[in-house]
Amino acid sequence: MSAIDVVGRYGAAVAAGDMAALAASLTDDVVWHQPGTNQLSGDHVGPEAVVAHLGRFMELSGGTFTLETESATESGNLVATTVRFAARRDGGADLDQHGVDVFRVEGDRIAEIWLIGENQAVEDQFWG
């Protein structure tokens, strides 16, 4: 399975809301690097921590968080995807940005994920 296929399997699990399949697409010691200086920022290690972290996006946005993959390219065991993500918070705050997610694949699972949003300051303000 190519690296881009592994990331595609992860993306399909995210889109379907299938947290068991999502966790199965990650290595036991996966590291999710969430940028910024907000309550979601920091490194999240292990599939359970990543699934819980993604749940926080939904919780904080009242279930409105969406993520769309626009394109994907690979180089060896690295995959870069261009994405669009959006959410709404109580009080009418909206977030709608483009970004790049970079995945490092080991075998048939994702070992590391880095996120890069187009405006980190706006994202930090939105998530608080």
Image (cartoon, rainbow, N blue to C red):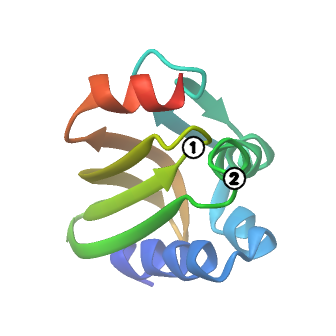
Quadrant holding the N terminus = bottom left
Estimate the x, y position of residue 32 in percent, counting from the top left: 53, 39
Q: Which residue in the protein does label 2 denote?
A: 62
The residue positioned farthest toward the top in the image shown: 37
Find out whether the residues at labels 2 and 1 contact each other: C-beta distance under 8 Å: yes
Mark 2 belongs to which amino acid?
Gly
Q: Is residue 87 visible?
A: yes
Estimate the x, y position of residue 14 in percent, counting from the top left: 59, 72
Q: CA distance from mark 2 to mark 1?
A: 7 Å
Estimate the x, y position of residue 16 in percent, counting from the top left: 65, 83
Q: Residue at x 74, y 77 (%)?
A: 18
Mark 1 belongs to which amino acid?
Arg
Q: Residue at x 65, y 54 (%)?
A: 27
- Using the image as rendered, state which of residue 47 and residue 19 is in the foreground: 19
Q: Which residue in the protein does label 1 denote?
A: 89
Decide: few, some or many residues near mark 2? Use Cα within 10 Å; few <14, some 14-19, many ≥20: few
